[in-house]
Image: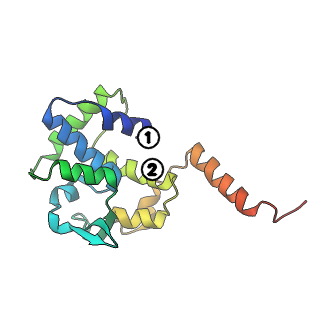
């Protein structure tokens, strides 16, 4: 998803609590990169304090690969919102609800929960997180799997070239 689409999902008012939960789980995935199954498996035991910050420490159910991700403000808000209860939801029901919410936001592209992981990876890479870190957060066993997410947008390309240009400015003359 684009930043505007993530913002639209974040700010839409939803009267149906099931749609709101599906949306919040999806956004949690957008800000952590954690898969739906791994989110479902999280318990308070997976949230640990490290260097004064809250982190999720767990293993991918699919691969058994350990991962850890620092909890930024938005995922922490979502955790607090749902602290009183933890419910199991079937992925297909969550996907149907996410599709409905996306449609209400005017998002035309195909949306499934996996898109939250993809959105996290693209955002992280576009804002300069090294691909090795993104790969570790996503719990990939091979960095080539993470490279699938490495879409180089024009904005990212311009940013990277400008950063490179500023680092070498004045070092070479013609």
The residue positioned 58% from the left and 44% from the top of the image is 155
Q: What mark, if any, has residue 3 been given in the picture?
A: 1
Residue 152: image location, x then y, percent? 55, 49
Taking the image as shown, residue 158 lies to the left or right of residue 93, namely right
Residue at 51% x, 51% y: name it: 126
How dense is the environment of label 2, judged by Cα within 10 Å: few (below 14), some, or many (20 and up)? many
Q: What is the C-alpha distance between the residues marked 1 and 2?
A: 8 Å
Mark 1 Cα shell of 10 Å, populated few (<14), some (14-19), many (≥20) = few
* Residue assigned mark 2: 123
Find residue 58 and report its horizontal and vertical position in percent.
24, 68
Q: Is residue 46 visible?
A: yes
Taking 5 as reference, is 122 above or below it?
A: below
Residue 30, numbered circle: none
Q: Position of residue 18 (x, y in %)?
A: 14, 37
Image quadrant occupied by the C terminus: bottom right
Q: Nearer the viewer, residue 54 or 115?
A: 54
Residue 146 location, x and y as percent? 43, 60
Tell me the residue at 32%/56% (across/down). 32
Mark 1 touches mark 2? (CB < 8 Å): yes
Look at the image and tell me in which quarter the N terminus lies. Answer: top left
């Amino acid at each position: 998803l684009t930043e505007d689409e993530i913002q639209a999902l974040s700010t839409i008012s939803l009267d149906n609590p099931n749609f709101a939960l599906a949306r919040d789980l999806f956004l949690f995935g957008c800000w952590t990169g954690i898969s739906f199954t791994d989110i479902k498996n999280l318990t308070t035991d997976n949230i640990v304090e490290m260097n004064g910050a809250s982190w999720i420490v767990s293993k991918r159910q699919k691969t058994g690969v350990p991962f850890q991700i620092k909890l930024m403000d938005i995922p922490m808000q979502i955790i607090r919102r749902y602290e009183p209860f933890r419910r199991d939801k079937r992925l297909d029901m969550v996907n149907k609800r996410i599709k409905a919410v996306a449609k209400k936001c005017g998002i035309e592209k195909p949306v499934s929960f996996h898109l939250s992981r993809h959105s996290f990876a693209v955002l992280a890479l576009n804002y300069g997180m090294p691909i090795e870190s993104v790969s570790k957060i996503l719990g990939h066993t091979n960095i080539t799997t993470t490279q699938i997410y490495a879409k180089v947008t024009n904005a990212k390309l311009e940013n990277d070239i400008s950063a490179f240009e500023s680092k070498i400015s004045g070092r070479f003359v013609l």
